Image (cartoon, coloured by chain):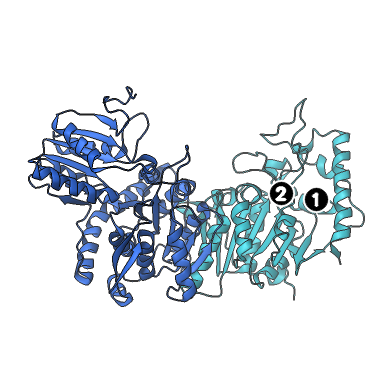
Amino acid sequence: MARQFISGNEAFASGIRLAKPHVISAYPITPQTVVVERLSEMVEDGSLRSEFIHVESEHSALSCAIGASSVGARAFTATSSQGLLYMAECLVYASGGRFPIVMMNANRSTALPWNIYGDQRDSLALLDCGWIQAYVKDAQEALDIALMSYYIAENERVSTPFMANLDGFVLTHTYEVVDVPESDRADLFLPPYETDNRLDLENPRNLAFSAGPEYNAAFKYKEHAGMMNAKQVITEAEARFERIFGRKYTGLIEEYRTEDAEYILITLGSIYPLACETADALRTEGVKAGIIRIRYMRPFPAVEIAEAVSGAKAAAVLEKDISFGNEGTVYTNVNSALHTAGVRTVTSDYIGGLGGKSISGNDIRHIYDRMMSGVSEVRFIGIDDRSGEGGDAS
Amino acid sequence: MSINVRDLNESEFFYGHKACAGCGGSLAVRIALKVLGERSVAVLPAGCMSAVGFNFPQLCFANNAIISTFAGTASMLTGIEAGLRAKGVSDFHAVGFAGDGGTADIGLQALSGAIDRNDNIIYICYDNEAYMNTGIQKSSLTPFGARTTTTPAGKNIRGNVKDKKNMFEIVAAHGIPYAATASIGYMNDFMNKVDKASRIHGTKYIHVMAPCPTGWGHEPCETVEIAKEAVDCGLWYLAEYEDSEYILNRNVKDFTDISQYLRKQSRFRHLRDEDIEYITKSRDAKWNEIRTKYKTV
């Protein structure tokens, strides 16, 4: 194992190198570019033996990956923001066809207004497209998820494509010390991709067909079941990963000091370490603060969140997203989980970090102040500091 | 060595589908697969051939076949070819069959990308001159004057006001290793072009004219005859592009009557003499260009 000082994009590229995809197809978009630049270099220097396809658009990037996956090849692509939206048609195509492609998405704001910085509106807008969605917190997890993603996606009980999300710039372009495993250890972890769901010259198949009203629901039910099976397979993958590499991951959510917490902040992605530090500070002041990080938005950790929140007086979601005309999408999902489980904890939603605006420790403290006041509200951090409806922004 | 009907593969690879009677497109797909054989992996975008051939559980291809997104014929071919090669599989043909809309409109970007990369694929455009699967709407390959459901022939506008895009020359302008036009009215020529394409490395493009009785408004039994007539009257031509050179395969000396060809099809029935005059002038101008620019045999 080598310790390297690399960025989130480079860490992800290193993980993909270890996973040895047969085909990489990608189109450049800020802030994803570095991951495909590094992969191109690896192909050039021979450390990665993949077919690197310089496609002319994101739609073709994913269409090409689907083609590769349809013959049983391991495929990778990466994108961000407008590029992710441009390939949206292919997202549902890949999941409906049960093609376990892995994609890295550099979370970035969506136009208009144009903005290249990080928020999570791009991937959350596509939550329903049938892809596993993971949100990582640092460069090490980026590398590890890159490797684990194929194990999970390609498992025959899952057969579902995998989108790994890294906060744009904050994660993709920040350098950290990362343990990069040796290739033979990675081989021990990740078996070759074997599937019957492929075009096979010895046993011809017709794939990606039409299914009318009488059959369609059965296919969609199986697609849903595959995604739900991912919960168990994620646990299996992490146990196997820990045995081989010694690093432990915690399934669909990560918790920090939630055992006795009265006030819990629920968030995702790179803001987690700052949230944990703020919780520590609040604890010294007598506030029983805890943090939940949602690692997977799909499959959604409904039971896990409900269990973790059940003893708390209040919980707040902090998310870089808004579903216009309603509230943040993460909040909707969390509330549904709590309601279904009969958890009556008061909840609120705080929308921040849009278009890359920094979220500070003070912003997080302010959320705790609001939680302790007993309100339930949906608020844009730094804009509608008085209103619970957003309509009173001034 | 040329191939002909007598030594064509007797196996059927596209069989039991529900295409309209007299469908030119399905004939092009059927015959091309007979030439290419069982180690063909066919990609068909959303469109007529995928709509008639892939209705679970009735799947009509005996070889490997897959539907792509409408825009994604070429990009999916690229992925299939790269994926099989990366897995060590050889001796196969990655072949796409897309209609005129799937090729010249929504699929043009992906096709251009594949040619630019010189991916080792065969792309066959079956041109029935409109979006037939969705109910006869205009594409950029709909000819001047044709009535479609989105270019109705009325008092103010008499059908499609634009000329057909020249996809063959657009593709050739990329410097592609091999491109050809063909017609199901000249089947031997088409079969030999498919066969030739299968022996060339890199991107190959064949544009085959394939009449659609439903959209063109002729009898199903007239499909092949009308396809032949389009070539004989000079509104379509048989050519190749190879080694940076255009070659005219069939140098028609005396064109048959354009109005006879047009009047057989209800899509042109509204045309006035002045429209037919315009079509004739356009044909003559194009043939003057062809005879200057193309090598004639």
Viewer-closest of B46 and A296: A296
Residue A270, compared with residue A46, is above or below; it is above
Residue A111, given in percent of the width and then of the height, sits at 47, 40
Q: Residues within 10 Å of mark 2 (few under 14, many from 20)?
A: many
**Pointers 1 and 2 in contact (CB under 8 A)?**
yes
Residue A228, given in percent of the width and then of the height, sits at 27, 51
Report which quarter residue A263 is drawn in. top left
Q: Going by the image, does A336 lie left or right of A78? A: left
Q: CA distance from mark 1 to mark 2?
A: 10 Å
Task: Report which colour depicts chain A.
Answer: blue
Q: Residue furthest right?
A: B254
Which residue is painted at 56% across and 69% down in the image?
A: B38
Residue B92, given in percent of the width and then of the height, sits at 56, 71
Residue A185 visible in the snapshot: yes
Q: Which chain is cyan?
A: B
Which secondary structure, mark 2? loop
Residue B116, compared with residue A316, is above or below; it is below
Residue underneath mark 1: B230
Which residue is painted at 40% across and 57% down in the image?
A: A103
Residue A178, given in percent of the width and then of the height, sits at 29, 66
Q: Going by the image, does A346 lie left or right of B260? A: left
Residue underneath mark 2: B211
The amino acid at mark 2 is: Pro
Q: Residues within 10 Å of mark 1 (few under 14, many from 20)?
A: many
Q: Going by the image, does A309 lie left or right of B82? A: left
